């Protein structure tokens, strides 16, 4: 039987019979649009907006091929009971988690700014998870959802590379998933942080996982599952 692989770093990523899931981390207005939490921290959101076309191409391919698609949002309850005071105190900025910004209360579930951006809005049947932490597995049902579907391989996209994406990928690695981060479908407010994260993930023979471009991923997925 022919082995189907993605031409990845540090070596080819083997695609299993059961298709991988696409996990899109936190492509929400609070992080990628002006007026959100990312901007409140003093960041330029333009680099994050720039990856939207690549994420959308990847998403549309996975939809067409029938892959499991998971969207996450970093989101807290309105009463902030799931937001530790130490987390809310971070940043040293005027607006903190739960404060009112131009798109509603920052990082609060149900507020306008907490929604996935329109270009990547989940379709019926896709999984949307509100997560109160940086990692997609913390205080969510993600592991159980993946296990129920027999999924062992995960493709990661989204923001930010060194925080929520990397945390989620490391959590997945600890749970036994084979993980690949799509290089041009992830971004940081700090380019050097993205470069360092990609290097850390693939170091020592892929200690956490693999990386590849969206073109490499799409080509391999189409060859394997179409």
Image (cartoon, helix red, strand yellow):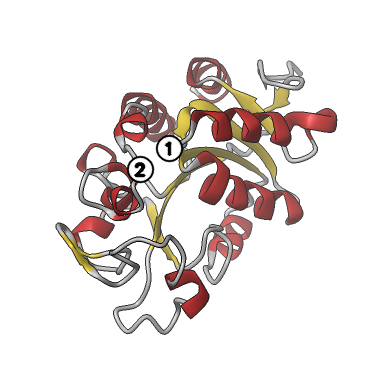
Callout 1: 10 Å neighbours few (<14), some, many (20+)?
Answer: many
- Residue sitting at x 31%, y 55%: 37
**Nearest to the observer: residue 2 or residue 86:** 86
The reply to whether discs 1 and 2 touch (Cβ–Cβ < 8 Å) is yes
Q: Is residue 205 left or right of residue 20?
A: right
**Nearest to the observer: residue 8 or residue 134:** 134
Res. 84 in view:
no
Residue 147 rendering spot, x and y as whole percentages: 63, 58
Residue 51 rendering spot, x and y as whole percentages: 37, 28
The residue identified by callout 2 is 43
Kind of element beneath mark 2: loop
**Nearest to the observer: residue 87 or residue 16:** 87
The residue identified by callout 1 is 189
Query: How many marks overall?
Result: 2
Examine the image and state in which quarter residue 49 appears. Answer: top left
Residue 127 rendering spot, x and y as whole percentages: 40, 55
The image shows residue 100, relative to residue 128, as above or below, that is below
Examine the image and state in which quarter residue 202 appears. Answer: top right
- Residue sitting at x 43%, y 32%: 62
């Amino acid at each position: 039987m022919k082995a189907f692989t993605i031409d990845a770093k540090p070596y080819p990523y083997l695609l299993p019979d059961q298709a991988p899931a696409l996990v899109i981390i936190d492509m929400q207005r609070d992080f990628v649009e002006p007026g959100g939490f990312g901007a409140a921290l003093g960041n330029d959101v333009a680099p994050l907006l720039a990856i939207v076309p690549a994420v959308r191409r990847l998403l549309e391919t996975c939809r067409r091929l029938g892959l499991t698609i998971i969207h996450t949002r970093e989101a807290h309850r309105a009463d902030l009971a799931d937001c530790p005071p130490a987390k809310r105190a971070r940043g040293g900025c005027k607006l903190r988690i739960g404060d009112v910004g131009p798109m509603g209360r920052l990082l609060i579930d149900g507020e306008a700014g907490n929604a996935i951006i329109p270009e990547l809005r989940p379709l019926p049947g896709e999984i949307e998870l509100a997560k109160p932490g940086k990692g997609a597995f913390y205080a969510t049902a993600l592991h159980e959802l993946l296990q129920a579907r027999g999924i062992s391989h995960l493709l990661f996209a989204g923001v930010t590379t060194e925080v929520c994406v990397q945390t989620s990928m490391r959590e997945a690695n600890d749970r036994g998933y084979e993980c690949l981060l799509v290089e041009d479908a992830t971004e940081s407010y700090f380019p050097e942080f993205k470069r360092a994260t990609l290097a850390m993930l693939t170091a020592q023979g892929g200690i956490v996982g693999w990386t590849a471009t969206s073109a490499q991923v799409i080509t391999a997925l189409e060859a394997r599952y179409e």
